Image (spheres, rainbow, N blue to C red):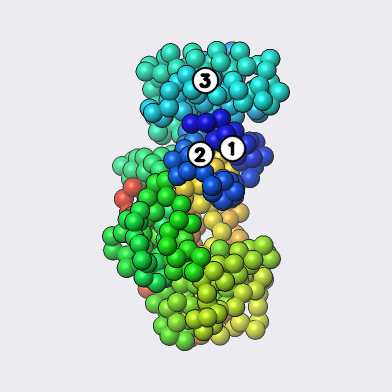
Amino acid sequence: MASNEREIIYESLIEIVENGSFSHVVEKNVLDKYDYLEGVEKAFIKRVIEGTIENQLIIDDVINDYSKVKCNKLKPAIRTILRMSIYQILFMDKVPDSAACNEAVKIATRHGFKSLSGFVNGVLRNVARNKTSIKIDTNNAFPEWIVEHFESNYGKDISEKILKSMQEESLVTIRVRDELSDYGGLLKVKDFDDAYYVSKGKSIYDIDGYESGKFIVQDLSAQRVMKFSGIKENDMVLDLCASPGGKAIHAADLGGIVRARDLTDDKILRIDENIERCNMSSRKVDITTEAFDAAVFDESSVGRYDVVIADLPCSGLGVMGRKADIRFKTKKEDLNALVSIQRDILTNAWQYLKQGGKLIYSTCTINKDENENQVKWMIEKFPLELISEKQYFPGIDEGDGFYIAQLIRK
């Protein structure tokens, strides 16, 4: 693999790990920018970015064992170069150790650290010589509080399956809206009418019908939300936190009259871009967008909607396999604050329902306080009846970790 791909990886990891940007946003922007690269090159970039972040705690322990300077004392550039290179040495059998070492030295030199290139080379070659004796425990890839959280709430067996699954490479999922002329590189998802996995190394832009909106990128969890919704022709639907628009477009495809909201103009722009690509106007469907804070009460929406979709901000513990940086950015102490934010939104959301209307509450986390206990709180406080709920676990159920509840306004 050429220096250029590793340079892209280096710059991406600096942006994500050192500067705090979201991994999925950086990765999407990078793969869009370098879409001219071959599929195998893009697959290499994607795997090393995601793998380095996923295994950062394991890799940092290795650095501490084989470097005289501890990981947290290293310059960010050198730390990043060592992390991405050690990932290649320990986790990628097809990458020659010599290539990982030599390219790391080149990156260090290019970024003004020629004086430290010998240090980089020495650490990496030492790791490479001893790699067969380095033991890798996937539980060590997660902060201790997350492992304890899963084990205490769901048991050791389920916890191990969750953590193991989150270390495996995730595939992009699409929902096919119109018949495609070519399904090459797509893998049908069991028990879903229109869901397909995109095979490794294949770009969504290379699939027939991307520009004409014949399909849309939509996680299985979001597709499940719409299964729970039971939207019928001409139902009034409000999607409170709609970006990037997959659920709102799905609701409109089912015949709903949809208002899609989110917090900022940037988020609304993403929804509008997807609506335009999916040719919603030519299909004569009714879908409108609006920047609106769901935590602010909207008097004009009271009693107006048949279905309210509340896929709310959460700790994201269910999608750590797809967004690996969540395991480092989310702290245990953040969970209570998120529960409070959710309650502010839910206090408003149920009031927008007609009598007999459905509230679809969902999160992409695995945390009872944000999920089952949140629903218990709603039932006790508001005139809502729980119809069904389900916690999905990666490694046990298809797709990410996700929670969905369907409630009806009495």
Which residue is pictured at 65% across the width and 16% down the height? Answer: 116
Question: As rendered, which of 290 and 229 lies closer to the eye?
Answer: 290
What's the residue type where badge 1 is placed? Answer: Ile
Q: Disc 2 or 1, which lies upstream in sequence?
A: 1
Contact check, label 2 and label 1, Cβ < 8 Å? yes
Horizontal and vertical percent position of residue 390: 37, 62
- Between marks 2 and 1, how big is the CA–CA gap? 7 Å
What's the residue type where badge 3 is placed? Answer: Cys
What's the residue type where badge 2 is placed? Answer: Ile
According to the image, label 1 marks what residue?
8
Horizontal and vertical percent position of residue 54: 48, 37
According to the image, label 2 marks what residue?
45
Q: Secondary structure at mark 2?
A: helix
Q: The C terminus is located in which quarter?
A: bottom left
Which residue is pictured at 28% across the width and 63% down the height? Answer: 191
Q: Disc 3 or 2, which lies upstream in sequence?
A: 2
Question: As rendered, which of 331 and 269 lies closer to the eye?
Answer: 269
**Placement of 193 over or under 54, stated as above or below:** below
Horizontal and vertical percent position of residue 74: 64, 22
According to the image, label 3 marks what residue?
101
Residue 324 in sight: no
**Placement of 53 over or under 365, stated as above or below:** above
